[in-house]
Image (cartoon, rainbow, N blue to C red):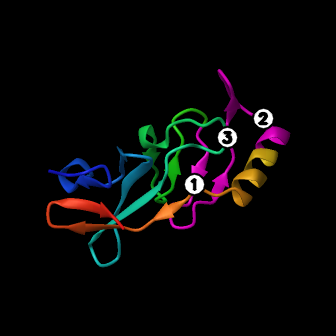
Amino acid sequence: MPDRDSVPAADLPARTVRRAGDWAVGNRGPGPDGEDRYFAVSRLCRHQLADLSEGTVDADGCLVCPWHQSRYDVRTGEMVEGPRGFLGYHGPTPGYTQLVRLLGSIARLRVRRATRQGDDVVLE
């Protein structure tokens, strides 16, 4: 039975994200070698602390926040695109977005290695 630092691999098809304790664990999809590329990052968005385990993985393999679509490079934890909104508003916020993106490049998400071990994706 998986513990809080693992997720059944069957629950992580390509471009999905799940929760494992304090971590958002996901699958960027197959790499050039055809193998799935798993990741684990801290769960709280640097913008307004949304739960990133409820996010999605875009075509570029970035983790996208479910609230305001901030995008994170899951290899480094850096925010690569700032939010598209604030609180309940969803739309352009140019100056604010730049400020949050700067913060997200400095205060990156924590990153852990995630590997497939048998039927589970395990955080190391």
- Residue at the spot of label 1: 72
Name the mark on residue 116.
none
The answer to whether marks 1 and 3 mark residues whose Cβ atoms lie closer than 8 Å is no
Q: Residue at x 27, y 72 (%)?
A: 35
In the figure, 34 relative to 95: above or below? Answer: below
Verify whether residue 88 appears in magenta: yes
- Residue at the spot of label 3: 47
Q: Position of residue 79 (x, y in %)?
A: 64, 55
Identify the amino acid type marked 1.
Answer: Tyr
Callout 3: 10 Å neighbours few (<14), some, many (20+)? many
Residue 67, image quadrant: top right
Identify the amino acid type marked 3.
Answer: His
Magenta segment range? 69-97
Q: Residue at x 81, y 39 (%)?
A: 96
Q: Secondary structure at mark 1?
A: strand
29 left or right of 69? Answer: left
Residue 115, image quadrant: bottom left
Q: Nearer the viewer, residue 22 or 28?
A: 22
Which is closer to the viewer, label 2 or label 1?
1
- Residue at the spot of label 2: 93
In the figure, 121 relative to 7: above or below? Answer: below
The answer to whether marks 2 and 1 mark residues whose Cβ atoms lie closer than 8 Å is no
Residue 123, image quadrant: bottom left
Q: CA distance from mark 1 to mark 3?
A: 11 Å
Q: Position of residue 18 (x, y in %)?
A: 35, 45
Q: Nearer the viewer, residue 41 or 2?
A: 2
Q: Secondary structure at mark 3?
A: loop
Q: Position of residue 40 (x, y in %)?
A: 42, 58
Mark with earlier residue (2, 1): 1
Identify the amino acid type marked 2.
Answer: Thr
Callout 1: 10 Å neighbours few (<14), some, many (20+)? many
